[in-house]
Image: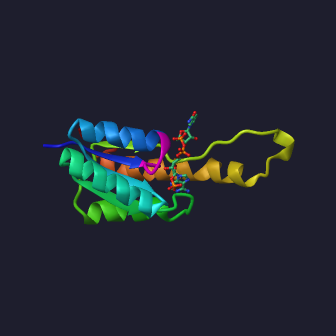
Amino acid sequence: MRKVALITGASSGIGKDLAYIHAEHGGDLILVARREDRLTDIKKELEDKHSVDVSVIVKDLSRIEAAQEVYDKVKSASIDVDYLINNAGFGGSGKFNLCGSEPIQAASWWPASFLSCLCGRVLCNPTGIHSR
Ligand SMILES: NC(=O)c1ccc[n+]([C@@H]2O[C@H](COP(=O)([O-])OP(=O)(O)OC[C@H]3O[C@@H](n4cnc5c(N)ncnc54)[C@H](OP(=O)(O)O)[C@@H]3O)[C@@H](O)[C@H]2O)c1
Protein backbone atom coordinates (compact mmCIF):
# COMPACT_ATOMS: atom_id res chain seq x y z
CA MET A 1 0.00 0.00 0.00
CA ARG A 2 1.47 3.35 -1.05
CA LYS A 3 1.73 6.03 1.61
CA VAL A 4 -0.11 9.29 0.95
CA ALA A 5 1.39 12.66 1.83
CA LEU A 6 -0.69 15.82 1.89
CA ILE A 7 1.63 18.77 1.33
CA THR A 8 0.51 22.38 1.61
CA GLY A 9 2.57 24.97 -0.22
CA ALA A 10 3.55 22.33 -2.76
CA SER A 11 3.74 24.61 -5.79
CA SER A 12 7.27 25.86 -5.06
CA GLY A 13 10.22 25.80 -2.70
CA ILE A 14 10.43 23.35 0.18
CA GLY A 15 6.93 21.92 -0.33
CA LYS A 16 7.60 21.16 -3.99
CA ASP A 17 10.95 19.53 -3.17
CA LEU A 18 9.31 17.34 -0.52
CA ALA A 19 6.67 16.31 -3.06
CA TYR A 20 9.40 15.17 -5.46
CA ILE A 21 11.19 13.24 -2.69
CA HIS A 22 7.98 11.49 -1.60
CA ALA A 23 7.16 10.54 -5.21
CA GLU A 24 10.68 9.23 -5.76
CA HIS A 25 10.02 6.87 -2.85
CA GLY A 26 6.84 5.67 -4.54
CA GLY A 27 4.37 7.66 -2.45
CA ASP A 28 1.08 9.18 -3.56
CA LEU A 29 0.43 12.87 -3.02
CA ILE A 30 -2.19 15.51 -2.39
CA LEU A 31 -0.76 18.89 -3.36
CA VAL A 32 -2.30 22.10 -2.01
CA ALA A 33 -1.53 25.70 -3.01
CA ARG A 34 -3.07 28.59 -4.94
CA ARG A 35 -1.24 28.37 -8.28
CA GLU A 36 -3.11 25.74 -10.24
CA ASP A 37 -0.82 25.79 -13.28
CA ARG A 38 2.20 24.92 -11.16
CA LEU A 39 0.40 22.19 -9.27
CA THR A 40 -0.86 20.67 -12.53
CA ASP A 41 2.64 20.67 -14.03
CA ILE A 42 4.05 18.98 -10.93
CA LYS A 43 1.25 16.39 -10.93
CA LYS A 44 1.88 15.52 -14.56
CA GLU A 45 5.63 15.25 -14.14
CA LEU A 46 5.47 13.08 -11.01
CA GLU A 47 2.76 10.78 -12.34
CA ASP A 48 4.65 10.27 -15.62
CA LYS A 49 8.01 9.75 -13.95
CA HIS A 50 7.10 7.69 -10.89
CA SER A 51 3.70 6.14 -11.66
CA VAL A 52 2.20 7.54 -8.46
CA ASP A 53 -1.22 9.15 -7.95
CA VAL A 54 -1.16 12.89 -7.43
CA SER A 55 -4.26 14.89 -6.50
CA VAL A 56 -4.35 18.66 -6.69
CA ILE A 57 -6.38 20.95 -4.45
CA VAL A 58 -6.25 24.60 -5.44
CA LYS A 59 -6.86 26.57 -2.28
CA ASP A 60 -6.02 29.89 -0.66
CA LEU A 61 -5.25 28.73 2.86
CA SER A 62 -5.46 32.23 4.29
CA ARG A 63 -9.25 31.98 4.05
CA ILE A 64 -10.86 30.84 7.28
CA GLU A 65 -13.02 28.23 5.47
CA ALA A 66 -10.06 26.72 3.62
CA ALA A 67 -9.19 24.02 6.16
CA GLN A 68 -12.72 22.64 6.17
CA GLU A 69 -12.85 22.71 2.38
CA VAL A 70 -9.60 20.78 2.05
CA TYR A 71 -10.80 18.30 4.64
CA ASP A 72 -14.12 17.80 2.79
CA LYS A 73 -12.36 17.29 -0.52
CA VAL A 74 -9.98 14.68 0.90
CA LYS A 75 -12.85 12.90 2.63
CA SER A 76 -15.08 12.87 -0.44
CA ALA A 77 -12.24 11.41 -2.48
CA SER A 78 -11.91 8.65 0.17
CA ILE A 79 -8.19 9.19 0.46
CA ASP A 80 -6.47 8.18 3.71
CA VAL A 81 -3.68 10.59 4.53
CA ASP A 82 -0.54 9.12 6.11
CA TYR A 83 1.60 12.24 6.33
CA LEU A 84 0.67 15.89 6.67
CA ILE A 85 3.37 18.38 5.69
CA ASN A 86 1.77 21.69 6.56
CA ASN A 87 4.38 23.87 4.92
CA ALA A 88 2.43 26.65 3.17
CA GLY A 89 3.40 30.10 4.26
CA PHE A 90 5.39 33.11 3.44
CA GLY A 91 8.47 34.85 4.69
CA GLY A 92 10.07 38.17 4.23
CA SER A 93 12.69 40.49 5.43
CA GLY A 94 12.98 44.18 5.95
CA LYS A 95 12.94 46.89 8.52
CA PHE A 96 10.31 46.52 11.25
CA ASN A 97 9.29 50.14 10.95
CA LEU A 98 8.52 49.65 7.24
CA CYS A 99 6.48 46.43 7.61
CA GLY A 100 2.70 46.54 7.39
CA SER A 101 0.62 44.51 9.83
CA GLU A 102 -1.25 42.37 7.25
CA PRO A 103 1.25 39.52 6.96
CA ILE A 104 1.56 39.33 10.73
CA GLN A 105 -2.21 39.21 11.21
CA ALA A 106 -2.59 36.51 8.55
CA ALA A 107 0.26 34.45 9.92
CA SER A 108 -1.21 34.50 13.38
CA TRP A 109 -4.34 32.48 12.62
CA TRP A 110 -4.46 30.39 9.50
CA PRO A 111 -1.69 27.81 9.99
CA ALA A 112 -3.04 26.92 13.42
CA SER A 113 -6.63 26.47 12.30
CA PHE A 114 -5.56 24.43 9.29
CA LEU A 115 -3.32 22.17 11.33
CA SER A 116 -5.84 21.50 14.05
CA CYS A 117 -8.57 20.71 11.55
CA LEU A 118 -6.57 18.36 9.36
CA CYS A 119 -4.52 16.67 12.06
CA GLY A 120 -7.56 16.25 14.24
CA ARG A 121 -9.94 14.93 11.63
CA VAL A 122 -7.96 13.39 8.80
CA LEU A 123 -4.87 11.97 10.42
CA CYS A 124 -6.20 10.96 13.81
CA ASN A 125 -8.91 8.58 14.88
CA PRO A 126 -11.90 9.91 16.89
CA THR A 127 -10.05 9.55 20.19
CA GLY A 128 -7.54 12.09 18.95
CA ILE A 129 -4.74 9.53 18.96
CA HIS A 130 -2.79 9.09 15.77
CA SER A 131 -4.10 5.94 14.15
CA ARG A 132 -1.09 4.88 12.07
N1 LIG B 1 13.14 29.04 2.83
C1 LIG B 1 13.53 29.37 4.06
O1 LIG B 1 14.70 29.68 4.34
C2 LIG B 1 12.54 29.30 5.21
C3 LIG B 1 12.98 29.57 6.50
C4 LIG B 1 12.08 29.49 7.56
C5 LIG B 1 10.76 29.16 7.33
N2 LIG B 1 10.36 28.92 6.06
C6 LIG B 1 8.96 28.58 5.87
O2 LIG B 1 8.87 27.37 5.11
C7 LIG B 1 7.74 27.42 4.26
C8 LIG B 1 8.15 27.21 2.81
O3 LIG B 1 9.13 28.16 2.47
P1 LIG B 1 9.69 28.28 0.99
O4 LIG B 1 10.98 28.97 1.05
O5 LIG B 1 9.60 26.95 0.33
O6 LIG B 1 8.60 29.30 0.39
P2 LIG B 1 8.03 29.48 -1.09
O7 LIG B 1 8.94 28.94 -2.13
O8 LIG B 1 7.58 30.90 -1.18
O9 LIG B 1 6.73 28.54 -1.07
C9 LIG B 1 5.62 28.88 -0.30
C10 LIG B 1 4.52 27.92 -0.68
O10 LIG B 1 3.38 28.26 0.13
C11 LIG B 1 2.27 28.45 -0.74
N3 LIG B 1 1.39 29.46 -0.17
C12 LIG B 1 1.70 30.70 0.25
N4 LIG B 1 0.62 31.36 0.67
C13 LIG B 1 -0.42 30.50 0.50
C14 LIG B 1 -1.82 30.61 0.71
N5 LIG B 1 -2.38 31.72 1.18
N6 LIG B 1 -2.59 29.53 0.43
C15 LIG B 1 -2.05 28.40 -0.08
N7 LIG B 1 -0.73 28.24 -0.30
C16 LIG B 1 0.08 29.29 -0.03
C17 LIG B 1 2.87 28.89 -2.08
O11 LIG B 1 2.02 28.49 -3.13
P3 LIG B 1 1.05 29.46 -3.96
O12 LIG B 1 1.74 30.78 -4.08
O13 LIG B 1 0.90 28.73 -5.27
O14 LIG B 1 -0.21 29.50 -3.19
C18 LIG B 1 4.13 28.04 -2.13
O15 LIG B 1 3.84 26.76 -2.65
C19 LIG B 1 7.09 28.78 4.48
O16 LIG B 1 6.06 28.62 5.43
C20 LIG B 1 8.21 29.61 5.05
O17 LIG B 1 7.73 30.67 5.84
C21 LIG B 1 11.21 28.98 5.01
* Residue 43 or residue 55, whichever sits in front: 43
- Percent position (x, y) of residue 25? 23, 35
The residue under the point 38% across, 38% down is 18
Dominant SS type (magenta): loop
- The answer to whether one can see residue 95 in this image is yes
11 drawn magenta: yes
23 drawn magenta: no
In the rendered view, does 80 fall on the left or right side of 8? left
In the rendered view, does 77 fall on the left or right side of 58? left
| Figure quadrant of residue 21 | top left
Q: Which residues are magenta?
A: 8-13
- The answer to whether one can see residue 80 in this image is no
The answer to whether 44 is drawn above or below residue 21 in the figure is below
- Viewport quadrant of the C terminus: top left
- Viewport quadrant of the N terminus: top left
- Percent position (x, y) of residue 37? 43, 62
The residue under the point 79% across, 52% down is 100
- Percent position (x, y) of residue 123? 31, 46
* Residue 55 or residue 82, whichever sits in front: 55
